[in-house]
Image (cartoon, rainbow, N blue to C red):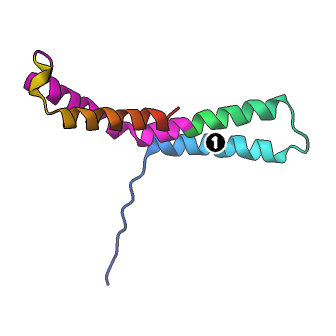
Amino acid sequence: MNLLLVFTMYDVVEDVLQKHYDKLWEMTKRNDEWGVMDHIRLEQMGEIEAAIVLWKDRHKFAAFSNRITEYLSVGGFFNPEMMEHDKVRDLLIEIRSLFNKHE
């Protein structure tokens, strides 16, 4: 008998955030008329969506931190002219795009 196990990446933080989002959405859908609480829930849902995106991108922040540390350690801290300018430019562009994504 062949047993095929499929492993998926389960993320408890993402799961909790998504369940909270789903509960807020269900509460909002049940109402016939829109009120103050619906607006509050929709605002909270937007914040939860942003938190999920940030959580999913958390590894990118660590990668940027490592690249900046590498830049500083190979002379960028004391002698910025020693660093390859295209690498610094690319790093800054990538960081900007990540920040723009999360605005």
Quadrant where the image shows the N terminus = bottom left
In reply to whether residue 27 is colored magenta, the answer given is: no
The residue carrying pointer 1 sits among few (fewer than 14), some (14 to 19) or many (20 or more) residues within 10 Å by Cα, namely some
Q: Position of residue 76 (x, y in %)?
A: 14, 22
In reply to whether residue 64 is colored magenta, the answer given is: yes
| Residue at left offset 44%, top offset 32% | 99
| Closer to us: 58 or 64 | 64
Q: Is residue 64 left or right of residue 27?
A: left
Q: Residue furthest top?
A: 78
Q: Residue furthest right?
A: 33
| Closer to us: 74 or 53 | 74
Q: Position of residue 52 (x, y in %)?
A: 51, 40
| Closer to us: 41 or 66 | 66
101 up-or-down from 72: above or below: below
| SS majority, magenta | helix
Q: Amino acid type of disc 1?
A: Tyr
Q: Is residue 62 left or right of residue 72?
A: right
- The magenta segment is 50-78
| Residue at left offset 83%, top offset 28% | 36
Q: Position of residue 69 (x, y in %)?
A: 18, 26
| Residue at left offset 73%, top offset 34% | 41
| Residue at left offset 41%, top offset 37% | 98
